Every structure is written in structure tokens, then in C-alpha cells.
Image (spheres, rainbow, N blue to C red):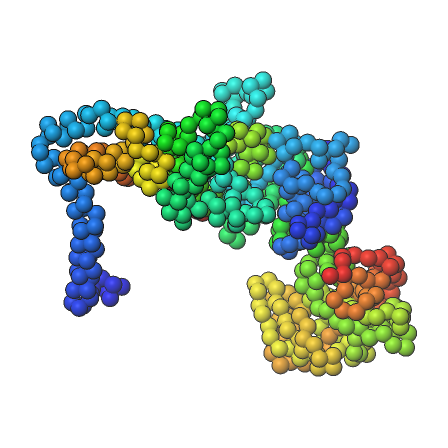
Amino acid sequence: MSRLDRQPPWPRRIGRGLLGLLAVGFLSVFLLLPLAVVFVEALRQGVHAYLSSIGQHEALAAIRLTLLVAVISVPLNVLFGVAAAWLMARFEFRGKALLGAFIDLPFSVSPVISGLVYVLLFGAQGWFGPWLGAHDIKIIFAVPGLVLATIFITLPFVARELIPLMQSQGSDEEEAARVLGAGGWQMFFRVTLPNIRWALLYGVLLCNARAMGEFGAVSVVSGHIRGLTTTMPLEVEMRYNEYDYVGAFAVATLLALLALLTLAIKTLLEWRYGDEIAAHAPGGH
Amino acid sequence: MTLQLSHLSRRFAGIPALDDVSLAMAPGEFLALLGSSGSGKTTLLRILAGLDYPDAGTAQLDGRDFLAAEARERKVGLVFQHYALFRHLTVAENVAFGLRVRSRKSRPSNAAINERVGQLLKRVQLEGYGRRYPAQLSGGQRQRVALARALAVEPSLLLLDEPFGALDAQVRVTLRRWLRELHEELKLTTVFVTHDQEEALELADRIAVMNHGRIEQVGTPEAIYQQPATPFVCEFIGKMNKLAVTSADGRLSVGDWVLDGLPGNDHHAQVVAYVRPEHLSLGVAETRPGWTARLRHVYLAGSVAHLELHIPSIGQTLEADVGGEDVARLGLQVGAEFRVAPRSAVVFALGEPEGSQSFEERWFWQAADAVPPAPRATSVSPIGEGRARAGRCS
């Protein structure tokens, strides 16, 4: 006991101090400094210039498009994620490992390749290009392409968040619900969903952050048509390439704020529902 | 309600979990499915609950096909081994669950549900716990919530999966008694799965001993203990000394101990005798067949003393149980030598060499002057169903 209470010997104290300094230094250089730079650069010419560059038609269109893409792709990924997690956590079947690998595929494939695949499939010269052209359906260089690419990129977030949780929770409670007379939907909404709600929300947050921030895949299928197919990250890049630094960083601040907001909501949830989340820990049933 | 299971079989990836199981349950009966893990007892319970289905066989409840009904339609109360309480719901809402999920037509009013929940919580001695969450309860309390939740739907059949498995020893015994009393009060047909024979012997009206997906024996605890039907039941239930019996010159013997009255028969590949530790007589007369034993250890466990007796003539160490006070009275000291002989034994003539569970004949043997003297004590004719087969060769 007394050994634990005693101060560590000074070489260890120094070692601990150095490690702490290293961690803080690393975080400052690689996380805080860039974040600060974004805001400093955006406000370099004053608040007025900042606000007016955000208020430009193209910027507003980019914000609207980004929100639209997220509003479509996030719910679809929630549906897919819950279904895939259910399948992975509750059933044994042939090819389960393969399905798991497929769910992870977007993590391992370069986003540029993901975008390119859609161009090869749906582009004018792609496999389905002629058919789509004949029926006057535009996917590539249009909003559907952006949505498809974003769905693909964000596919693993919800599923990967839920699978380990659902596996560790097991199916006992769901079976109990069935034996007590619950139908399939009753079981899902009264037992399954409440048990995974925080993990699901967490997955949705990550999914949303990525959906709004995705650059590579979206860049390939976008075609960079200003005011029509440029999302916020693309708008940042275009402005930067046009030497409009204030404009680029102004839009970038919005993305940074989104990241901070995501972090804040996540922290708030963990704080506000801490005991309920704790009750979710394995063995807490 | 009478539940009749006939020839149920279930395989998982080719491995039989249930193998031709038939069983009848009388109304109000308290039946234990006893077996080690992998014996198929939980599979059988899950089939009864509607969470799994057999590959073959039928189950009839009062003559109706029980298996045709879905889990939610069966009105079965199931208490899971780890209770499976809904962790996001309060105790009261857990208990109310089965009533809340009913269709609007058959769902009781909120007031009625609350009243019923109150009654059930009172019945399981958890009044005032309604607003708590499962995580805030002890293991024994969770178990009782799970029971109240199962009883809320007024089940016609109550299934308990290792109901005391996750509890510590003291709570276990208290809950066991309490559950027995509750059963006597409710008269609900109850099936419980357990690997703990003490639990089964103490609680159940009847026990079905399971092994490798088959039922080895069904009977009252007394019958299971005193008249084990198969070598497996002998080895599984209680403690047994297993002795290899020699069959020669028309008689059966183990060293100097002769099983008088049993026909020695050379065509049996192997004969084994099982003797319970409490059926070994100590200090028998020289004139009687028996062995000279040396006392190796005395384990005094409260009211009972377990003795470890080495018998040089057969090269085996046997276990004998005597009353704790007898240890001093008989002057039992480690190293002491005296003669011992079994008072009774269960004897199996195995059809095949060791490792096989099948046997050809079974006898209950009792010593000629066994106390209390029974009229037919001299020898017992084969009670075993000739050429009976039990268990599987595996």
C-alpha cells in the first residue's frame, strides 16, 4: 500500500513528464495548429470578408448539396448498417467472413478508386453508360453519382460500430421478447434498437462526418460543376486552386466546425447518458 | 396440460444434439433435465420454447401439435440462464413486457397491467423494486424478476434454463427451496435444465438424465439414485465405486468378494459392479466374503466422513461414507486395517468391451444379511431388461 502511495522516484517522474510533453506537443503540432490555421486564415481579411465569401452563391450551393448528400446517404447507411450487423451478429452462414470483408472494403480501397469504379460503371463510356444515356438518366457528374460514391465510402461506419456490440450482447434478450409474445417488429423496436441506440448514434455521427467531409471519391464523380456538383470539400479545393485563400479557408471553417460539433455531441451524449451507457457494458445485464 | 414428446431429433452440423428423445410430462409436474454440457438438455428446452425446431419427431400438448405454434403463440414462460432481462427497461417494465406486446384487443388496460405487475413483484418478494434497472439488482433478484416476467403471460408451461447456475452457493439453496414452494403453490408444469445433480435430486418430481442427446433414464429422484438404469447413470449420479467383476466357474466375484446368487456367465465380455460409498460395510466378520482394507484418508465433511480405503488384493482404492460420529466410535485411524464388504451393488453385464455404453443385463445385488433384512435379499434375479440398450456407442 505505502509503496503505491509514495511518489515515484524522480527518474520515473521525469520520464512521465517527458511522455506527457511529447503527447501534448504531438497533438498541438498535428491537430490544434492546423485547426487554428484554418480559422486564422479564414479571418485574415476580417469578419466581413469571411462572411461574404461564405455567403456567395457557390458556397451556399455547396453547403446545400453537402447537406442533401448526407441526408440521403446517412439514413440509407443506417438501414444497411443495422441489417448487415443483424445478419453478422445473429446468424451463422456460408460466406459470413466474406461479407465481413466486403463491409470493410471501403476502408481498404482508396477513395479515388471507389469513385473511379462508379465512373466505369455509370459514366458515358461505362458499362451501363449507353443504357443510361438512352433513358436520359445522369448519374456521373450529377447528384446521384455523389450520393452513390458517398454511400460506398461511408458504408462500414454504422455496421462496424454495431457488429461487435450486438455480438457481445447476444440474442438472449431478443429470444426472451419472442417467447414473451413479441412479433418481429416489436422485438426490434422494443428490445434490439434500445440496446444499440448509443452505438447506432455514434456510428451515425461518424458516418455523417465522413459523408460531409469526403473528398476523393466525390471528386472523381463530381465533374466539378460549380454550383451544381461541388460539395464543400470540393469547393474548398477549387477556391484554393484559384488563389482565393480566404474563401477556401472560410468554407473550411464550416467543415472544421462540423467536426467540432460532432465531437461535442458525442461527448455530450457520453456525459448525459453516462450511466445508461455504462449499463450497456457487457455483463451489466 | 399433458405434453408428449415423441422421437425428437436435432442435429447441428451433422452432430446429433438430440437423438430420438421421447418424454411425457404430466400436468403440474416438476421435471428436471439433468446432464453435462453437450448432453442436449438445453437444445430440448429451446425446442419446447419454440426457439429451435427438431429435425424429426413430434410434440403434442393435450393432443395438439405443439411444434406448429410459433414461440410467441406457445404461452411458454422461459427463464434464461443469464436471465436475459431487458437492460434498458425498469424491473416493472420488464415484468409488463409480455402484456404490453399483446395486440390491442387482448392487451389489458394500463391500470390492469400495473396491478398485475405489482402482484407478481410481491409474489417474487421484490415489492418496491419496480423502478430499478436490472443492472442495479443482485443475481438472485434478477433471477426472480426473470421469473416474474415469465409468469406474467400466464404460461401453461414454465421452462427454466440452469435457474441457479449463475448464483453463489448460499443464494442458490435459498432460491431452490423458494422455487419449490412456489411450484407447489402454482402447480405449473415446469421443466428445468441443470447440470447439478444435487439440485435435480432435491427439487424435481422426476428427473430425465441425458447423455449424448439421449435420455438414459427417467424416474423419480429415488429411482434414479437407487436403481440406476445404465452404467452412465451410475457414474453420473452420486458417487460410485466401480469394480471390474471376474466371471469364472459359474460365479461372479471381485477378489474375495463373491456376488452370491448372480449367475456367472462366460459369454459376457465384461461385468462391472457399482457400489455406493454408503453401501460399504466396515469391520465385517472374517467368515463373510470381503476384502482387507487399509484406511488411507479420512475427510470429515461435517455430518459425513469420507474414507479412502485401499484394498491391496484388488489393487483399488475405494471410497466409503460413514456418519461423522462413527469415525471416533469405530476408532477409525489412518493406517488401520479392517475388513470391508459391499452391502449392495448394481451390476451390469456389458455386451461390448469397455467404452461402450450398451449393456446386456442388469442386476441389483444385495448381501445375504443386509440390514434391514428383506425377504428376497439372498439374491436378486435380473431386473434388467434383457438385452436392454441404453446410451449410444460413441
Query: Is residue A7 shown to the viewer in this render?
Result: no
Location of the N terminus of chain B by quadrant is: top right
Name the foreground residue: A31 vs B70.
Answer: A31
User: What residue is shown at x 52% (from left), y 48% (from top)?
Assistant: A98
Is residue A175 toward the left or the right of residue B341 in the image?
left
Q: Residue A201 at x, y = what percent?
A: 37, 36
Q: How many marks?
A: 0
Location of the C terminus of chain B by quadrant is: bottom right
User: What residue is shown at x 57% (from left), y 21% (from top)?
Assistant: B103
Q: Residue B370 at x, y = what percent?
A: 80, 65
User: What residue is shown at x 89% (from left), y 72% (from top)?
Assistant: B266
Residue A97 sits above or below residue A51 on the image: below
Q: Residue A91 at x, y = what percent?
A: 56, 43
Name the foreground residue: B94 vs A256.
Answer: A256
Q: Residue B178 at x, y = what percent?
A: 57, 42
User: What residue is shown at x 76% (from left), y 48% (from top)?
Assistant: B20
Is residue A165 toward the left or the right of residue B288 in the image?
left
Name the foreground residue: A200 vs B10.
Answer: A200
Is residue A222 toward the left or the right of residue B240 in the image?
left
Query: Is residue A86 shown to the viewer in this render?
Result: yes
Q: Hey, which quadrant is residue B300 in on the image?
A: bottom right
Q: Hey, which quadrant is residue B244 in on the image?
A: bottom right
Is residue B234 toward the left or the right of residue A28 in the image?
right
Residue B44 sits above or below residue B100 on the image: below
Name the foreground residue: B75 vs B56.
Answer: B56
